[in-house]
Amino acid sequence: MINIAADLGGTRIKLGILKAGELLAATNLEALANESIEVNLARISEAARALMTDHSLTKGQVKGIGLTFPGIVDSQQGRVLSHYVKYRNAHAFDFRAWARQEWNASLALENDARAALLGEWVKGAGKGHKNIVLLTLGTGVGSAVLLEGKLLRGVHFLAGNLGGHMSVNLKGRPCNCGFFGCLETEASTWALPEKAKMHPLFRESSLSKAGNIEFANLFQEAERGDRLSVQLVEECLRAWGVGVVNMVHAYDPELVIIGGGIMKKKASILPYLQNMVDQYAWAPAAGSVKIVSAEQVEYAGLLGMDYMVSQLS
Ligand SMILES: [Zn+2]
């Protein structure tokens, strides 16, 4: 038997076919995030059928479908709870009915960060641990928590997911969630261009000549000694560090896994975060909470959903 898993992001949808916990085949497609969820699911089905044909697999072999969603998810009912701006009408959609009708299969639906954490737990950096916080540093900041070997969900399915919306700055700018000074308002890809442009050093900075302001060129310009870039890198590292310490204080993990596109610069980021945790977190001794990089950079979400589907009765 096989499982089909899809990881629905803001710009890409990753799709995989998995058997016995291993990824047999994978592809990815553009997310038509302004289109309805039905349109996107139809495209996922079409791409899955093509992958299966390539590998001589048939619909009768499909046991389950696992989908991640970039928002708050009721994994017990298989429903999206957040009125997310992407994948229009997803919150009203019956994913289980769709999986039955389209694939004659059972369905698991989970928040994307929780799925990635499960993937890292079963096949990546979290193997052998029971108390893990995962933070993804990217367009936004995602988070999830595994406590005593169980995914934390909470009564409103919010538990562990809001690391990006813990405030780290009382005087911070308004966040798109309505709060202020959130970790992702202080240090994420969506927030970076505005943060740079509003800075008094922007006019004299080499960043003012960059077409796109993103972390890749921010780190590069900082290495070249650009004053604004040096300052912004330091501010972002400190914001992430405060975020990690807050998560450690909230959940008391033994391991913090950091993933996301920004981790291409992990050589600069990981030691900084480890130092902050060693210095500031309430932990028995330096090193008792380890900060590590995600290992399943591409497919943690697919591996996590395959695991969730395998746990369905
Ligand atoms: Zn926020």
Image: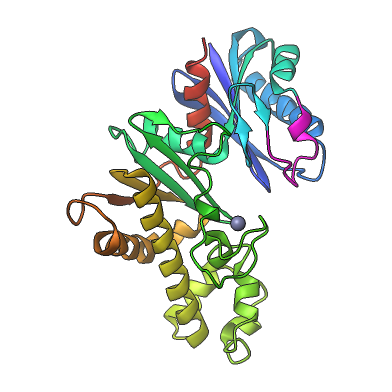
Picture mark count = 0
Q: Give the image location of residue 59, x and y in percent.
A: 66, 11
**Is 43 included in the stretch rendered in magenta?**
no
Foreground of the two, 70 or 171: 171
Q: What residue is shown at x 47% (from left), y 23% (from top)?
A: 307
Q: Give the image location of residue 268, x and y in percent.
A: 37, 66
Q: Give the image location of residue 127, x and y in percent.
A: 32, 34
Q: What residue is shown at x 57% (from left), y 89% (from top)?
A: 201
Q: Give the magenta part as a residue range.
A: 81-93
Q: Is residue 297 above or below residue 138?
A: above
Foreground of the two, 152 or 102: 152
**Outermost residue, bottom side:** 204
When asked about the image quadrant of residue 22, the answer is top left
Left or right of 18, for residue 245: left
User: Is residue 299 in sight in this rendering?
Assistant: no
Left or right of 130, for residue 136: right
